[in-house]
């Protein structure tokens, strides 16, 4: 059996080692594949992020702005101050 394996191995050449040109090509291909993977990840996350912003962040921001900016206070505060001054 060992002889058969050795016989199969004879006459075959070892695969050539990667040259610097092949190495730079492989590096470029790896960079392209990684960039494609990053873009795919962003494309998967973007809809969820958009949903969170629309359904959570915008309503919270509107609620906080209404809590701080209330036009009815500007109209009623002078009347309240006058009523408090007449109280005594």
Image: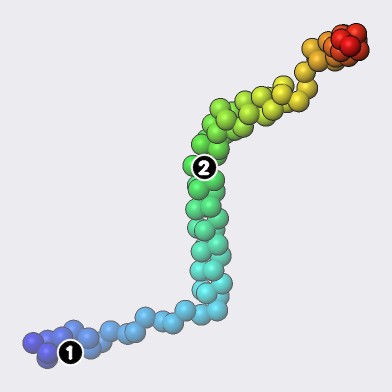
Residue designated by label 1: 6
Q: Is residue 54 left or right of residue 81?
A: left
* Residue that appears at 51% across and 74% down: 22
Q: Which mark is residue 45?
A: 2
Look at discs 1 and 2 and give the one toward the viewer.
2
Q: In the rendered image, is residue 35 in sight?
A: yes
Q: Residue at x 90, y 8 (%)?
A: 86
Residue 30 vs 8, above or below: the answer is: above
Looking at the rendered image, the quarter that the C terminus falls into is top right
Q: Which residue occupies the foreground of this view, 42 or 65?
A: 65
Whether residue 75 is visible to the viewer of this picture, yes or no, is no
Q: Residue at x 54, y 68 (%)?
A: 27
* Location of residue 13 in the rendering, given as x and y in whole percent from the top left corner: 32, 85
Residue 70, how many percent across, how many down?
77, 18
Q: Nearer the viewer, residue 49 or 13?
A: 49
Are there few (<14), some (14-19), or many (20+) residues within 10 Å of tag 1? few
Q: How many C-alpha atoms fall within 10 Å of the one at disc 2: few (<14), some, or many (≥20)?
A: few
Element under disc 1: helix
Horizontal relation, residue 7 to residue 57: left or right: left
Mark 1 / mark 2, whichever is N-terminal: 1
In percent of the image, x 52 and y 35: which residue is there? 47
- Quarter of the figure that contains the N terminus: bottom left
Numbered circle sitting on residue 58? none
Q: Is residue 2 above or below residue 30?
A: below
Q: Secondary structure at mark 2?
A: helix
The image quarter containing residue 14 is: bottom left
Image coordinates for residue 64, horizontal then vertical, percent? 69, 28
With 60 as the anchor, is 71 left or right in this view? right
């Amino acid at each position: 059996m060992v002889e058969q394996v050795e016989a199969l191995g004879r006459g075959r050449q070892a695969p050539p080692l990667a040259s610097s040109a092949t190495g730079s090509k492989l590096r470029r291909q790896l960079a392209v594949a990684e960039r494609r993977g990053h873009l795919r990840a962003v494309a998967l996350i973007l809809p969820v992020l958009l949903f969170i912003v629309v359904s959570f962040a915008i309503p919270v921001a509107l609620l906080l702005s209404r809590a701080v900016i209330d036009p009815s206070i500007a109209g009623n505060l002078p009347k309240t101050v006058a009523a408090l001054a007449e109280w005594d």
